Amino acid sequence: MTNQFKEKFLTHVRTLQDQITQEMQRLDPSLKLIEDQWQRNDHAGQPGGGGRTRAFTGEIFENAGVNTSCVFGKIDPVFASKLQGTGDEMWAAGISLILHPRNPRVPTVHANFRMIEQGSKVWFGGGADLTPFYPHEDDFRHFHGTWKKAAGEHYAAMKKECDQYFVNQHRDGEMRGIGGLFFDGYNSGNMEADFAMVTELSKQFIPSYFPLVEKRVNEDFTAEDEDFQLHRRGRYVEFNLLHDRGTLFGLKTNGRVDSILISLPARCKFTYQYAPAVGSPHAKMLSYYRPQQWA
Amino acid sequence: MTNQFKEKFLTHVRTLQDQITQEMQRLDPSLKLIEDQWQRNDHAGQPGGGGRTRAFTGEIFENAGVNTSCVFGKIDPVFASKLQGTGDEMWAAGISLILHPRNPRVPTVHANFRMIEQGSKVWFGGGADLTPFYPHEDDFRHFHGTWKKAAGEHYAAMKKECDQYFVNQHRDGEMRGIGGLFFDGYNSGNMEADFAMVTELSKQFIPSYFPLVEKRVNEDFTAEDEDFQLHRRGRYVEFNLLHDRGTLFGLKTNGRVDSILISLPARCKFTYQYAPAVGSPHAKMLSYYRPQQWA
């Protein structure tokens, strides 16, 4: 029965990848797309699946990656012992995306949804989180509201996990953005129900985010807005390279480097003891990069 | 006797910090300096020394940090057991610097020199490495030549260690730059000789690097030069956050974050599968980010 869901999940994420691509192309007619289909060998040197990486650059989406992959086969036994399943054979499929808009009034977004099988265990993981640069509180309520409605009884726990995960611990616990949902190792014992929940959640990505792009993309912005955005992108880089388990996992297991580091922003800034002007909208944003209720 | 050398080493690195500061100010009259004196507590909550951080921004040196510190006291026993010495008390002093020039024809440079005591053991570490963005081979020969002359019989081993250390392993073994010197755990059994060697080496930083700034700073550069520089700075960020032991050590031991991450460049770029134009001076540079003899 598991095999049937694996097949369905892979079809689902590939369809979602196409839908998100179309939505981006609709919003940004300047968008250029590089698609790379890649394959890998497993730990034993046997064919181990691969993926479809889509790298975008455009006027609205300065840079973005919307990737799917399906990998399988033998894994390093030392590494295998640290995972939740059993044995050294694995199957994993998922979609992972990150969009860095050019206009600082439009938030950056990240999402991923994955299904993993290791030996006799199967589990789901995923989530979506928003990194805004301007205090459009309505947008934060829209994003969290969409996920709250979709996740229902799971929202509180998944939001909390997100608040705890996307954190620059070395920056005194400052979050990368304003959170969203995060879950891992999800298996309720009813695969049909879990599969339905995760695929339904993943379908909420489009309505959770793209309305914010449409609403804000023509908003004028200032040099200060952009300066703040570029510095926050710097913090994004710090999180991804210092703390993100997915990134470090991928790099340590000889993942496809270009597909992993597609998450980094096209441009960013680092300044010693950077701080936005007192009383500015950007100073206000700093108070929002801490756990709080938005829905 | 150790205490006498500790005192002398601290005086030495502070003097060197002043000399390097003066040299930078002489070359870049626009240079702005923020100096922060900071203090820390040790693992037991007792006063544990501190440092003098100097953060620079200017027309020639877009951003730079020239830091000294002297820290001491109890350290985390788990962490202590991973170090080369004995016991959970430590003393460490050093100078650490990184200069990111604006003009891509001028190389970025990093250096540090340190003396460490843990229990009954004392050792020295340090080095200097160059990250050029343009194939001015004469400059590479000058930099390596200076260090070869200074390090004498130690050059070959220290150069090799440098070639092996400043490497983005996740980028197929590509070096951060063109290397230089690197050594750690240095103790020949003759502290007077070791102290003399390390302090003499550190004095070579000024003649190894600043003549290259004077020679190249007024050279015209192209948009392509800058684009290449900004992408190589991106690789610099990848190395510092993913691989650099000093950075990860500092962040894991609750070091002063702003002083540690002063190493990151003011601006940088990331592009999916970035590659310089075939036949360009920048494509030529890529072949130089691999171990080779320059002196």
Image (cartoon, coloured by chain):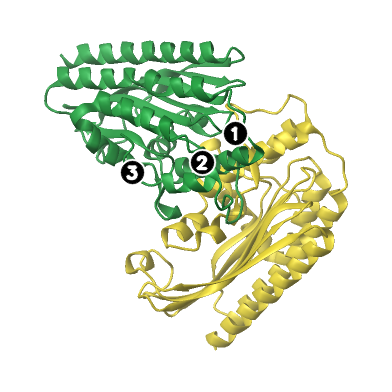
Chain colours: A green, B yellow
Q: Which residue is mark 2?
A: A237
Chain ID of residue with mark 1:
B
> Within 10 angstroms of label 1, few (less than 14), some, or many (20 or more) residues?
many
Distance from label 2 to label 1 (Cα)?
A: 10 Å
Q: In the rendered view, tell whether residue A90 sits above or below residue B42.
A: above
Q: Is residue B283 visible?
A: yes
Question: Disc 1 vs disc 3: Cβ atoms closer than 8 Å?
Answer: no
Residue B55 spot, x, y in % from top left: 65, 61
Q: Which residue is mark 3?
A: A292
Residue A267 spot, x, y in % from top left: 61, 35
Residue A210 spot, x, y in % from top left: 45, 20
Question: Disc 2 vs disc 1: Cβ atoms closer than 8 Å?
Answer: yes
The secondary structure type at the circle numbered 1 is loop
> Within 10 angstroms of label 2, few (less than 14), some, or many (20 or more) residues?
many
Nearest to viewer (mark 2 / mark 3):
3
Give the quadrant of residue B143.
bottom right
The answer to whether tags 1 and 3 share a subunit is: no
- Answer with left or right where residue A91 lies relative to residue A264: left
